[in-house]
Amino acid sequence: MGQILSGIILTAAGAFLVIKTEWFINNFGRIAWFEEKLGSDGGSRLGYKLVGIALLFLGIILMTGSGDDFMLWLLSPILKYS
């Protein structure tokens, strides 16, 4: 039950971050690293959205309990699992 609740919270936080990106920029400002690496005009917006999408995926993986399967799939080229 705890992992489902944690997954829902992560998914909701990721969705909020993606939907309300402008609110985050207005309240927390631009992040210099995002501006430098992702472009000068919309770098922080894109960075906030990428972090939100990553939180969404992590929340879904945590909710479904498929973290082990996902990590094996992700690391299979390195670990030589098939």
Image (cartoon, helix red, strand yellow):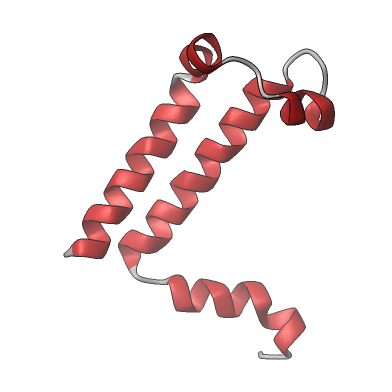
Left or right: residue 48 compared with residue 42: left
Q: Residue furthest bottom?
A: 81
Instruction: Give how far across and how far down residue 36 sits, in percent.
Output: 83, 27
Number of disc labels: 0
Instruction: Give how far across and how far down residue 27 sits, in percent.
Output: 48, 12
Q: Residue at x 33, y 38 (%)?
A: 12
Q: Residue furthest left?
A: 1
Question: Relative to residue 56, is residue 34 depicted above or below?
Answer: above
Q: Residue at x 51, y 20 (%)?
A: 21
Instruction: Give how far across and how far down residue 78 sits, in percent.
Output: 76, 82
Question: Relative to residue 25, is residue 7 depicted above or below?
Answer: below
Q: Residue at x 67, y 90 (%)?
A: 81
Left or right: residue 53 compared with residue 63: right
The part of the image, by quadrant, that contains residue 32 is top right
The part of the image, by quadrant, that contains residue 14 is top left
Question: Relative to residue 2, is residue 36 depicted above or below?
Answer: above
